[in-house]
Image (cartoon, rainbow, N blue to C red):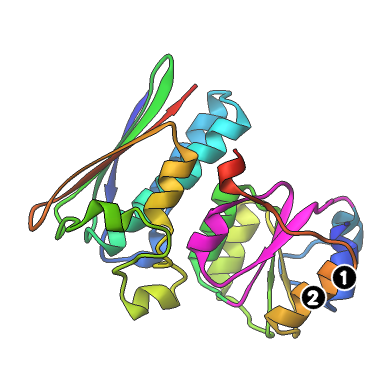
Amino acid sequence: MLKHYNIDGQDFSIAGEASSDFKRRLKKLGISPDVIRRVAIAMYEAEINTIIHGGGGECDAEVSNDKITVTFTDHGPGIKDIDLAMQEGYSTATEQIRELGFGAGMGLPNIKNYTDDMEIETEVGKGTVVRLIVKL
Amino acid sequence: MLLSEIKDIVKAEVLTGESENDLRNIDIHNACGSDMMSDVLAFVKDQALLLTGLINAQVIRTAEMMDILAICFVRGKTPPESVIELAKDLGMVVLRTEYPMYVACGELYVKGLEGGKNAKAL
């Protein structure tokens, strides 16, 4: 199964709709609840990041025989220091985003914790690709 | 702890329309209290309750991803109708208490409702 989602960077109220839709589809496929929860949480974190840091973008989610791969692509400012961004508690989110319940500096560490593999390709001024993989 | 007991302990009202009998059929194993959804997402919960003072749609989305069964809004906060409707669509129970976060969590904790495990334990 392959699904493509456009991630709207302007409307925070609908953030999470892609993750919600993909979670429902995984349930229909009969995938184990633990795997579904790990994918859903990691995907939701990445979706939120794509909106608040990347200004929106695209998502491709694929279920293959042995794994689930979800790739988020944005054309935002990129990540200057990935090691710093991976530290729990570090965040560049604005006060406005914090008031919405995000920007605690847990997004990327959460994605890493819940997935079997996470890849980040980023270039300052050009954007970021985050790929998360959960094995079946 | 049954959700009906939780409702009584924090003197909550039900915003999603479930009856007392419905609440007696929902067993909550642990809980967390936070206004930061990223912190909520960092902890594994099993049949959990989320207590929060945040009332936007992302509270419901976060709970959905975590398979959280019920949400209790603290400090007497009432979420917009659209947020309650989203919770109903997803089969979540939404409560509201006048208690502030610290008191609501404390009352539940001393009655035996514990916190969750760290995500790294997965």
Q: Distance between the residues labelled 2 and 1?
A: 6 Å
What's the residue type where badge 2 is placed?
A: Gly
Q: Which residue is painted at 40% across and 66% down in the image?
A: A13
Residue B13 place in picture, x, y as percent: 79, 75
Q: Which residue is painted at 26% across and 66% down in the image?
A: A10
Residue A106 place in picture, x, y as percent: 43, 58
Quadrant of the snapshot with the N terminus of chain A: top left
Residue B7 place in picture, x, y as percent: 84, 70
Q: Nearer the viewer, residue A40 or B92?
A: A40
Residue B17 place in picture, x, y as percent: 76, 65
Give me the chain letter of mark 1: B
The answer to which quarter of the image holds residue B74 is: bottom right
Tell me the number on the disc at residue B73: none
> Which residue does the numbered mark 1 point to in the structure image?
B110
- Residue B51 on the magenta span: yes
Tell me: B23 left or right of B97: right
- Whether marks 2 and 1 lie on the same chain: yes
Single out the residue that lies furthest toward the left.
Answer: A125
Q: Nearer the viewer, residue B90 or B97?
A: B97
- Residue A98 on the magenta span: no
Q: Are marks 2 and 1 in contact (CB under 8 Å)?
A: yes
Label 1: few (<14), some (14–19) or many (≥20) C-alpha neighbours in 10 Å:
few
> Which residue does the numbered mark 2 point to in the structure image?
B106
Vertical position of residue A42 compared to residue B43: above or below: above
Q: Which of A73 and A109 is in front in this view?
A: A109
SS at circle 1:
helix
Vertical position of residue A58 compared to residue B28: above or below: above
What's the residue type where badge 1 is placed?
A: Val
Q: Can residue B64 be seen in this view?
A: yes
Vertical position of residue A36 compared to residue B82: above or below: above
Vertical position of residue B103 compared to residue B90: above or below: below
Query: Which range of residues does the magenta coloring cover?
Result: B25-53
